[in-house]
Image (tube, rainbow, N blue to C red):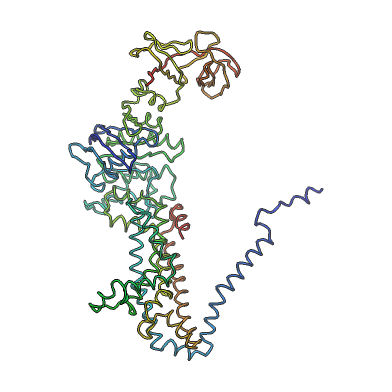
Amino acid sequence: MSAIATRRKPPRIGDGPVFRRSLIGVVLVLVAILILAPLIIIGVEAFSKGWQVYRDTIAHPDTRHAIMLTVLTALVAVPVNTAFGIAAAWAITKFDFWGRRFLLVVIEIPFSISPIVAGVAYLFVYGLQGIFGPVLDAYGIKILFAIPGIILASMFVTAPFVARELIPLMQAQGRDLEEAATSLGASGWRTFFAVTLPNVKWALLYGVVLCNARVMGEFGAVSVVSGNIRGQTNTLPLHIELLYHDYQAAGAFASASILALIAVFTIIAKVALERQGAGRVRPRAPEAANLAEKAS
Amino acid sequence: MKIRLDHVVKTFETFRAVRDVSLEIESGELVALLGPSGSGKTTILRMVAGLEYADGGHIYFGEQDATGIPVRDRGVGFVFQHYALFPHMTVAENIAFGMKVSKVKREKAAIDTRVGELLRLVRLEGLGDRFPAQISGGQRQRVALARALAVDPKVLLLDEPFGALDANVRRDLRRWLREIHSELGITTLFVTHDQEEALDLADRVVILKDGHIVQQGTPEEVCRDPGSAFVMKFLGDANMIAAEVRDGKAYAGGAAIEVSGLADGKAELYARPADLDWSPQGPGIPASINRVLDRPGGRRVLATTEAGEHLEFDVEPERVVKAGDGGFVTLRRAKVFAIG
């Protein structure tokens, strides 16, 4: 009977094998071209002149200094921005105050402003012709073309990262948990550490990882305020650019490989931490888990 | 502990949520704050808890003025509508939280013993190691109650405690909460928009509208003698029929009923579905039947009067009525309120 022949159900949208395969294929090709290929090139080019050149580049005092400076910047900027992000998210989601929405918008500004604009703005604030420049100069405090300027510019650019991860999650979670904890007699700190933090820790971690990656990779703002002094105010991304312009392609790629490695390690660390944590906490409330997913 | 609210006022931005509310809750009493949404009932509860501060007036716990005492030190047990259990803690850890953070230091063993007692009290023995996500809604609400009771609160406050649960669980929990209340004798105030819940559970019902108390009394008092058309309508299904009062009687399209203490003039007559009846002959309010809804306990008749008023009333299961029948609606009893 023809009934059997026509029994094949029509495929639902997106369910046809052709559609599915082509969709997966397109994504794989794009990932290969856009993400994997550059990473591989970095690795290949870094070692194109051999292991010796690679080691020499890394061992070069300027490169080592650039690495140290980048790490130092991250060590200062990430904790400060984490504290800022937590405080901002807490304030915005748990309190009602005048200008709350405005603050929300202000926090987002560094996301939408080009980093180079931020750098130029810092020049006008702290530069010798700037607002605070002469005063600072009079006291012998050097901000621009020195480490404080680099750290400040990096902090500006990455200020929203932690807050942005936390705010939607904490908004969705509401204030009930904190109110419950307080009504049971918990102090503010106790409430934060025992109730709020455990429920946002994955979003927080994610924000910290993103913030760190961005601090280490920041180029635009830092290039304006650092002055590019080799061995003094050169961060790793600036150093890479300098080497590249000096026609030391292998050196540039070697330095880039370090930055790329750091990035890969941050991602691995994040995944590993999540796994370990998820195993320890075992079943999280499904609502909370969903919220966390939505937020990230 | 006796709770007293004295001319309490609360305004949010420009919205006056609570306007001059005075209320006394006797020690050991179980009181329901009942009202539609926006009536200020939850705000009152939160002010008693200290989660909101009153803009005016005072709240007394016993003789002590508690108006300015922060929630942390107020010693209330608060149960949230959506439980607000800490999702990363087990049931036992949730219950122990208040004892752990308390300024009064307790031995770990003492805390464990108390948690065990509370789990027994809320009939959740053996579930102490579960996480909130692993238990049902009704169980979560019981954990929330145990957690609130763990700190020996002076007063127990419940915000729509059964609002998020389905009807059967709700009914069971209501009985159970009543039992717990008789067992512990703790002064309890709860908020609900469900009249049935308030009437089933409370010693006294406080009915609110637009931030005012419109009536308070035992369930019997408010049911038998609603003080206004609003209370009449809010407590349950009610039919409204335009009426006129003359010489101590209210006349509504051919039906009449004795009233006392009402001046002559236009009035509104309210009757519950069980207060009306159907008769093929007058006297009564001439009407025709639109539909008959059959229910296990009887038949509900939907009818329209000649004046165009829609009425709903119940008749016995044996009664033969059908859509299209004409006849008369008669009054068994009714409440009449003057207009204005």
Q: Please name whichever residue, B142 or A184, is drawn nearer the observer in this view of the structure.
A: A184
> Can you name the residue that lies furthest to the left here?
B63
At which x and y percent is residue B164?
43, 41
At which x and y percent is residue A148?
32, 76
> Can you name the residue that lies furthest to the bottom here?
A52
Which residue sits at x=26%, y=36%? B8
Classify residue A80 as left or right of residue B136. Answer: left
Q: Tell me the quarter of the image containing the C terminus of chain B.
A: top left
Q: Please name whichever residue, B277 or A269, is drawn nearer the observer in this view of the structure.
A: B277
Classify residue B70 as left or right of residue A215. Answer: left
Q: Tell me the quarter of the image containing the N terminus of chain B.
A: top left
Which residue sits at x=27%, y=39%? B155
Could you tell me how many numbered marks the image carries? 0
Residue B145: quarter of image: top left
Residue B48: quarter of image: top left
Q: In this view, does B215 lie above or below A198?
A: above
At which x and y percent is residue A236?
42, 80
Which residue sits at x=51%, y=85%? A46
Q: Please name whichever residue, A147 or A46, is drawn nearer the observer in this view of the structure.
A: A147
Q: Please name whichever residue, A94 or A119, is drawn nearer the observer in this view of the structure.
A: A119
> Can you name the residue that lies furthest to the right here?
A1
At which x and y percent is residue B142?
37, 42
